[in-house]
Image (cartoon, rainbow, N blue to C red):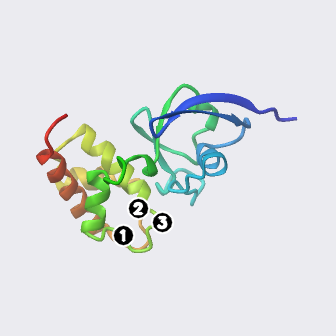
Amino acid sequence: MTTARTIAFTLNGASVGADVKPHENLVELLQAQFGLTGARESCGQGMCGCCTVLVNGRAVSGCLYLASFADGAEVTTVEGLASGDALDPVQDAFIETAAFQCGYCTPGFILMAKQLLDEHPDPDDSMIRHYLSGNLCRCASYPQIVEAVRSAARRRLRRPSA
């Protein structure tokens, strides 16, 4: 018999609660209880990056991360990056450079790029490629993805600090 456990966490800036089963992963929770479909389970092994979400500012594979581990954490999905109608600079850059074709992998790349730029505001191409090496794009939009991260870095460096 599996019993659900109640957890509380911050999701995209809002305090939320959820009942989770012991085997439920974070992607399943986000989709089933919150209707957030940006993180997608693809490989189920944490090898493709489609399920990437940020937990306490660090990228995790949502298909491997048990939902119960989110208790007390701050979880950010691609849906939570925008501020009102204003997209995050990384999201803007991906649109500007057409850094996607089918878009299936795009949310994971955007969140990894955000983490990269939070840690290294002005990365070179080698660092970008290394940092994003755990995310796969089956449409082969890699040159545009690298350009999007470069563009996002420029945007963020120009942005006045709050």
Category of crowding for the residue at label 2, using alpha-carbon neighbours closer than 10 angstroms: few (below 14), some (14–19), many (at least 20): many
- From the image, which quarter does the N terminus lie in? top right
Task: Kindly identify the residue that appears in the image at 60 percent across and 52 percent down.
Answer: 35
- Residue type beneath disc 3: Tyr
Which residue is denoted by mark 3 in the rendering? 104
Give the SS element for disc 3. loop
| Disc 1 element | loop
109 vs 33, nearest the viewer: 33
- Residue 160, image x, y percentages: 13, 41
Rounded to the nearest angstrom, the CA distance separating label 2 from label 1 is 6 Å
Q: CA distance from mark 1 to mark 3?
A: 8 Å
Q: Quadrant of residue 64?
A: top right
Q: Residue at x 55, y 30 (%)?
A: 9
Number of marks drawn? 3
Q: Is disc 2 in contact with disc 1, using a CB cutoff of under 8 Å?
A: yes
Res. 106 mark: 2
Q: Is residue 82 left or right of residue 118?
A: right
Residue 15 placement, left or right of 130:
right
Indicate the position of residue 11 as horizontal and vertical percent values: 51, 38
**Labels 2 & 3 near each other (Cβ < 8 A):** yes
- Residue 42 point in image, percent of width and height: 57, 60
Query: Taking 25 as reference, is 40 above or below it?
Result: below
* Amino acid type of the residue that numbered disc 2 sits on in the rendered structure: Thr
Q: Position of residue 148 (x, y in %)?
A: 25, 61
Foreground: 101 or 6?
Answer: 6
Q: Nearer the viewer, residue 51 or 156?
A: 156
Q: Amino acid at mark 1?
A: Phe
